[in-house]
Amino acid sequence: MDILSDVLEILFRSLFSAAALFIITKIMGYRQISQLSFYDYIIGISIGSISAVMATDLETDIWKTLVPMIVYGVLSIILSWITTKSIRCRRFITGTSVVLIEDGEILEDSLKKVKYDLNDLLGDCRNAGYFDIADIEYAVMEHNGKISFLPYPNRRPATPEDLNLTPQKEGLCVNLILDGQIMKEHLKAVGKEEKWLEKQIAQSKAKTIDDILLATYDCNDTFTVYLRNRDMKPIQVLD
């Protein structure tokens, strides 16, 4: 029975710690994931370690581990607020951008400053689509560790403006059907009714709405249907 009670307590603690971690992360914001800075990394590790202790250490009171998790979460929110109000604090806490390549020249001192290996730089160049480093005019390491590249004007892909073209506006596609379910709020947002949707479905090759994996509608009044059958190509129906 002791083993069973311990298992049940660990299960409860795990669920509780996961719920607490989820709530604290939501409060801290998605910046923790999308723009992980140095202090975000430290706080994230600390909260994760405390959460693991909360789930497995049966001798520790669950509330004694919840409090430091909240403290770290509040600390992250305070630091985020400070960095938005003070440029000096922002530079100190999150760091500043560092130029790694300037006018086509690799700055070795900058690589040493950020402790960044040349092979890593070449790998990031290839990941960004630059297999010849001579194509790059500037490369900047942002405060979150990501590299931004600026190629020479004659090495960058041509744009419609370079070719004196005026492409048609695309805008965002709205999902009207998702996995066989009608997204009624999205349908209302584009000013359409279900009768209109049924008409569009009838013009496609879908027999029923369950046959549709995804259906989108864009600003050019194009209704596109993606059927569940992988052999079927997307079907476009003009409104």
Image (tube, rainbow, N blue to C red):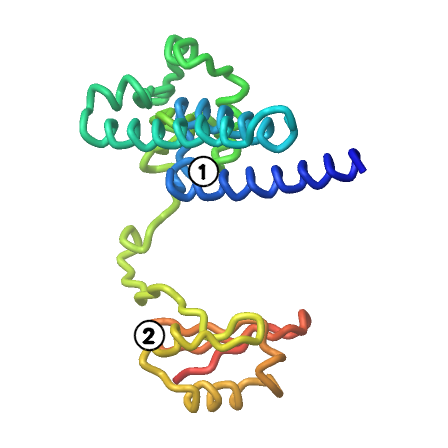
| Residue wearing tag 1 | 33
Q: How many marks?
A: 2
Q: Along the horizontal axis of the image, is 223 left or right of 12?
A: left
Kind of residue at badge 1: Ile
Find residue 153 and report its horizontal and vertical position in percent.
31, 37
131 relative to 216, above or below: above
Kind of residue at badge 2: Ala
Find residue 103 and report its horizontal and vertical position in percent.
31, 22
Element type at mark 2: helix
Element type at mark 1: helix
118 relative to 173, above or below: above
Question: 141 or 79, which is in the foreground?
Answer: 79
Pointer 2 with pointer 1, Cβ within 8 A: no
The image's mark for residue 189 is 2
Q: Along the horizontal axis of the image, is 93 left or right of 43?
A: left
Mark 2 or mark 1, which has the lower sequence index?
A: 1
Badge 2 density bin: few <14, some 14–19, many ≥20, Cα 10 Å: few
Find residue 184 and report its horizontal and vertical position in percent.
42, 77
Question: 79 or 124, which is in the foreground?
Answer: 79
**Among the 4 quarters of the image, the one containing residue 95:** top left
Name the residue at 60% across, 84% down. 206
1 relative to 109, above or below: below
Badge 1 density bin: few <14, some 14–19, many ≥20, Cα 10 Å: few
The image's mark for residue 12 is none
- Is residue 156 among the parts visible in the rendering? no
Image quarter of the C terminus: bottom left
